[in-house]
Image (cartoon, helix red, strand yellow):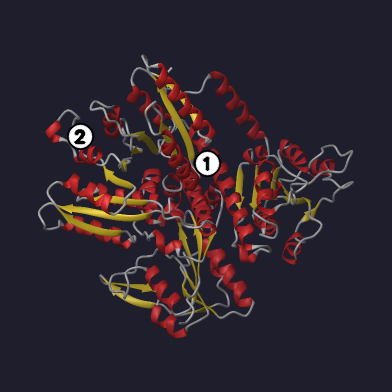
Amino acid sequence: MTGHSDRRPNPDELLRRVQAEERRKQRGRLKVFLGYAPRVGKSLRMFDEGRRRKSRGQDVVVAALQDRVTENVSELVRGFEVIPAAAGAINLAAVFRRNPQVCLIDELAYDNPRGSRNAERWQDVEEILDHGIAVITAINLQHIREQQDAVEAVTGKRAAQSVPTAFLHAAEEIEVVDATPESVMGEARTLAELRELALLLAADVVDRQLREYLDSHGVSAGWGTQERILVCLTPRSNAAEMLASGQRNARRFHGALLAVSVEQPGIGAADQERLQRHLALAREMGAEVHCLKSADFAEAILAFAHEQRITQLFLGHSLRARSPVERLIHAAEDFDVRLFPHPEVK
Amino acid sequence: MSRRGTLKIYLGYAAGVGKTYRMLEEAQALRAAGADVAIGYFEPHGRAETIAKTAGLEFVPRRTIAYGGTQFEEMDTDAVLRRSPAIAVVDEFAHSNVPGSDRAKRWQDVRLLLEAGIDVLTTMNVQHLESLNDQVWHITGVRVRETLPDWVVDEADELVLVDLTPSALRNRIQRGVVYASEKVHRALDNFFAEANLTALRELAIRHTAHEVEEKLVAPRREERILICLTAKPASVNLIRRGKRMADYLQADCLALHVAVEGAIDPVVERHMNFAGNLRIHTHVEEGSDIARVIAEFARLHHVTQIFMGRSGPRHWYQRFGETIVQQVVRLARDIQITIVAERRR
């Protein structure tokens, strides 16, 4: 195997896509407003969107409300038909009977009372979508399950209710409700950290949507909006420095760190061991590690870099005259090549 | 010394996402809270909902400038300074003023307001950032002409993302909210194609996250990046890429041109000016052995990373025709060297 992979999806993958596409056509569209802290204004934005859709003639109802809302929000809510909750949960039967085009659902992260049809509100939303009804909803960062450790590290608190990130990934649209911390209540640094987390989460969701869009339209875009760093490890490279630098770079750009080695025939036992140590270090530092097999080092690296949409390639300076480094520099048209000093060879 | 005004930027990723609307909403809220707000410049683009948001706000009359037989209207910076509101609303931060204006760029006008202690609310799109110019071109095929140096945006006290999903934006365009109807289809097929918008949106979100992070992390100045400038057009790309890298890695950034004959090529002069405008410290050294001068300069200035463009096609075995890159690589084995790709479309 080399770094190449067939770009065409296999039949199973195609079938899965077609089926997903079919489901999507029948399902209602899901739109989620994402805030980074309470009172950032996401409910207001959600109801405002509902108001605008209504003014364009769409049939919009409210199916879930928060207990406490600001004056601005409650004024907006007055303009909608509300389907009241039943036994502390969304009245799904009533929603299906009413069968609106669009359902507004505030407070997505919510545990239904025991004995409800679904344990959590986002599952109710799934059912509403399955009935072909569009849903607009709002959620704060601290309620996203996979973000809760990070949020707790910042705030020291953990919200009891949560929604899986997969739910967000399934949304057709996710919109960030941003505001500067001074307009939100809380400690400035904490808020800034939450804000950054929310923005990065949104960027990842958007990046995924972009990839899906490009894949489904058969576009193999060589460009990306994210920095992707590939560290090439050889037995003699200065792995620690290259990886540390790659890690810092990836962190600062919120990009991806990959490490790669090319298994070449005739490598000695000592070199083999050194290479294994380097790869282990790469894994330890959080790099996505790939081992390629090829007789042609430069060719394998190039193909892999293209496939992985690499933007920066880290290589060790070679002391040899006839080195693949030269070839890589010449062939690298859409990524930068960064050469690292070689550890002293005595 | 009097207080400098604060700068708040509403950042979007395309025309029509609602930057001006959000800015005016804030201006209205401030006015309702009793603040002295005036509009220094507002671009209505014929959008009714946005225009309605200016109701009750005071406008400082614009200045008319004749150029090429046409009358252009620009912000009357002197009039805004005389009026001296607590808060000035100035749309389109990246705008280039018509020739004959006192300053070439609106952001320079805004700096004058800030220096006079006036708080400013303004708008821009992420693609107006100089450091993203090549990336945006690569993604969209559009070379954005109105750019502003990143440091101008970094200096802002607040940056707020104005987000809208691409499908919502395309709906708005379809409904004729953003552009006049005859332009709609062309817009949707070109710049406003879904993939373009999604990519630009991701850039805007990431840039906002970056600005938030910059205010959180203590600066470290452990790295120094040296950009090697030549007369090649790719130098511009090299400068942007090197500076962006330096900004993200919190590194000092220097640029060097090695003049072989003493006299400096006017193209190099332009590149040096461009680098200087981005707040890169530029240097010129004389010498005939270019690679040696670069390596020595790098050591003397404790450079940790040298940025170079690719040399033309040559082969490693042409010992005497070794490219500059090859020579620097050979002479500076103790320094990291980055060879920047041109990233053609």
Q: Quick check: B81 left or right of A336?
A: right
Placement of the N terminus of chain B among the 4 image quadrants: bottom left
Q: Are marks 1 and 2 on the same chain?
A: no
- For disc 2, the marked residue is B313
Residue at the spot x=47%, y=33% of the render? A258
- How far separated are the C-alphas under marks 1 and 2? 35 Å
- For disc 1, the marked residue is A207
Find out whether the residues at labels 1 and 2 contact each other: C-beta distance under 8 Å.
no
Against A24, residue B91 (above or below) is: below
Tell me which amino acid carries mark 1. Answer: Asp
Q: How crowded is mark 1: few (under 14 residues within 10 Å), some or many (20 or more)?
A: many
Element under disc 2: loop
Tell me which amino acid carries mark 2. Answer: Pro
Horizontal and vertical percent for residue B249? Answer: 43, 50
Of all residues, the one furthest to the bottom in this rendering is B82
Residue A5 visible? The answer is: no
Q: Given the image, what chain letter belongs to the residue carrying mark 2?
A: B
